[in-house]
Image (cartoon, coloured by chain):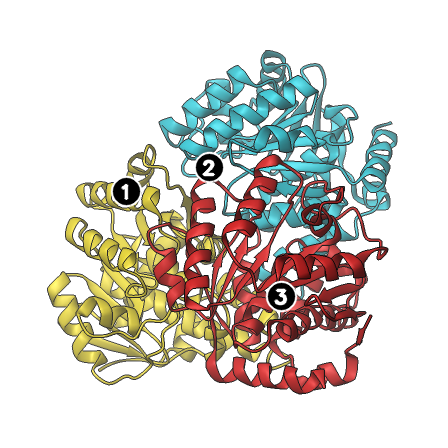
Chain colours: A cyan, B red, C yellow
Amino acid sequence: MLFSYFHEIYEGIKRDKPLIHHITNYVTVNDCANIVLALGGSPVMADDHKEVEEMVSIASALVLNVGTLNQRTIESFILAGKKANALGVPVVLDPVGVGATNLRTQTLQRILKEVKLSVLRGNMSEIKNIYGQDGKTRGVDSVDDSLAGGKEIALELAKRLDCVVAITGATDIISDGEQVFYIENGHKMLSRVTGTGCMTTSLIGTCVGTKKNPFHGAIMGTAIMGIAGEMAYEALEQKEAVGTFRMKLMDAIGSFSMECFQERGKIHEA
Amino acid sequence: MLFSYFHEIYEGIKRDKPLIHHITNYVTVNDCANIVLALGGSPVMADDHKEVEEMVSIASALVLNVGTLNQRTIESFILAGKKANALGVPVVLDPVGVGATNLRTQTLQRILKEVKLSVLRGNMSEIKNIYGQDGKTRGVDSVDDSLAGGKEIALELAKRLDCVVAITGATDIISDGEQVFYIENGHKMLSRVTGTGCMTTSLIGTCVGTKKNPFHGAIMGTAIMGIAGEMAYEALEQKEAVGTFRMKLMDAIGSFSMECFQERGKIHEA
Amino acid sequence: MLFSYFHEIYEGIKRDKPLIHHITNYVTVNDCANIVLALGGSPVMADDHKEVEEMVSIASALVLNVGTLNQRTIESFILAGKKANALGVPVVLDPVGVGATNLRTQTLQRILKEVKLSVLRGNMSEIKNIYGQDGKTRGVDSVDDSLAGGKEIALELAKRLDCVVAITGATDIISDGEQVFYIENGHKMLSRVTGTGCMTTSLIGTCVGTKKNPFHGAIMGTAIMGIAGEMAYEALEQKEAVGTFRMKLMDAIGSFSMECFQERGKIHEA
């Protein structure tokens, strides 16, 4: 059933080449642009407050990523987010490192208050912080990979925020407030490359940019990253080759097809 | 004939290692730095208004790329551009996404008014927008790859701006306002990697940094990218491997020699 | 003897995954993040003045890199540096391009005046400039690779600044003001990839993040880069393949072990 939705999204991406407007961090921005392009979307990065509203007006989705937020871009997050809401452009938020500093926590609260999200994607630390539990954030990497409570948190937070919540980790947990899906794809090498979380958010942005159900888009984008991680790892000749792994990850996305889902997808209701 | 000019430029790069000052976007900046270095130049990225004039004073060329422009860097474009003009340092401009927002369009107009360019390089959408036709820009990727009218636009715009105009696409069109050259090199995989346009602009900057004729420099820089794209594609074992392609592109530039022109160059007058 | 210190640092990184807070440039930031992660640390990049003090408070080391400094980040360098000093968090400084502009030189002087460093790492041009000699800086690449006087400069500057000084080049020279070590590892291909200096600084940051002797950390971080450069070069099938070299460099760090030191380390007292 899910696969037929994925198929529609996949066709939509290939047909429409959705423009995905990012206001994102300068650490992983190149990888985010390349991964959107590899899947078939068209990335555009623009963050000045004088152009973000206009840019989001021609976009199919807006990705907000607070990885290297600053006073200037915080205003742009809000302006672009509100404009996206007014126009029905789906908004995907990556709360990088929320909880690590007050600035991040306050900015997240402000975005959540002023902008209606379609999808919120973070690691367990980040999502727990937003949920209101101590997320044990330390920098931008999750230090909490337990699955315990994840299902309830995803479900409750999705209800509260009225959006899809995707918690990515060894097992990904995705909920729209009614259903919860687990994705068992992926490989631990993904945590040895910076920005695989950001890239997953950009893939989700590309999928929801087709304007199909954002729940399906979030599951699909997350699953693509997990499956690509498996494909990249299998293509390695040397196990700890993190540089080669990163390149092969992009290769896997560039050659991704619906068959990859059928052969490898480990997606099931919780 | 052209090859003897290319040879002079090539020797100049290897001998002088020209310093190429970039004020550029944070999406593709690393690729731009690496490609300048791969060809034999020395890249420097500096954008604060308190240092750009001093930096451009020691540079052999200035590359302005508006991909992620903001209020702060717009001032730096102007300051650096004017200083470059005063000192006779060639200026190469990449009008990324002009037409997508008013901020981009106005900034481009301002740069063109206040700074004298040596080379303007863009895709057909961007160049048509500057020329005054509806360029159908959508984000930063060209949605207009028709060759129709390209020759006239390049020629007329080059005359009007008194600079070299390079329109890159499936066929590249380059004019100095008197002659027009077509370059038939390249591969469609180049459009599946972000920043190949920006990188072409940086290669042009490196070539014009030798202070030879900017028309020859623009043709040479553009042709190198096209030829490198062919070499990178041929080196692939798996066709859709966009990550590997991107790496092989850098390998091709790093091992580029004059023989590559002789064996592969498809450059002719229009 | 040195190896037993390296062993302690190595174990510390693997055990504690030190959080390395960077305020760095947008050119090589992704490579810096990936290299820290490849060695076993946890990178975080954050530069807003409202969060840098809080971020450095949870960090194991602070890396300041002035590559693309601006008015906003200069304040953040100072705020974060002072906080790091107050908390005993080691500070590693990369004076990219000091001497190329007054802004860089003044900023460096200000940082050196207001922040106590653990390690200063630069190329010969940059270190000579700080030492007070004409460093012949031209952009961000060293144009001075002579070893002459290096030992004395490293020793004297380390005494004067009361920190470890690492001069990287064909031969790396590292001093704590009492001893001087030379490292003969490395490969000239390292100078054909942008950011290998920045990456070395980040590796040093990761090593000193274990809170062991910063002299040992600086020697170790520098030697890892040199050895990884040799490993990457040997893994190349095509000699001028700068793109592949860059990827293999990351592979080498990702698979680095203490055996690499024993087999390849060329470290000796001057």
Q: Mark 2 and mark 1 in contact? Answer it, CB < 8 Å.
A: no
- Which of the chains bears the disc numbered 3? A
- Camera-side mark, 2 or 1: 1
Location of residue B269 in the rendering, given as x and y in whole percent from the top left corner: 80, 74
> Which residue has dot 1 on it?
C75
Q: Using the rendered image of the protein, determine whether residue A7 is visible from the camera's viewpoint.
A: yes
Share a chain, discs 2 and 1?
A: no
Answer with mark 3 or mark 2, whichever residue precedes in sequence: 2
> Which residue has dot 3 on it?
A238
- Which of the chains bears the disc numbered 2? A
Q: In the picture provided, is B266 more to the left or to the right than B94?
A: right
Q: CA distance from mark 1 to mark 3?
A: 43 Å
Q: Residue at 70% across / 65% down in the picture?
A: B177
- Which of the chains bears the disc numbered 1? C
Q: Residue at 53% across / 79% down in the picture?
A: B13
Kind of element beneath mark 1 = helix
Q: Amino acid at mark 2?
A: Val
Q: Is residue B97 above or below residue C188?
A: above
Q: Amino acid at mark 3?
A: Gln
As drawn, the label of residue A143 is 2
Location of residue B210 in the rendering, given as x and y in whole percent from the top left corner: 52, 77
Q: Point out the image quarter for the C terminus of chain B.
A: bottom right
Most foreground residue, C22 or B119:
B119
Most foreground residue, C111 or A98:
C111
Q: Residues within 10 Å of mark 2 (few under 14, many from 20)?
A: some
Q: Residues within 10 Å of mark 3 (few under 14, many from 20)?
A: few
Q: In the picture provided, is A96 more to the left or to the right than B176?
A: left
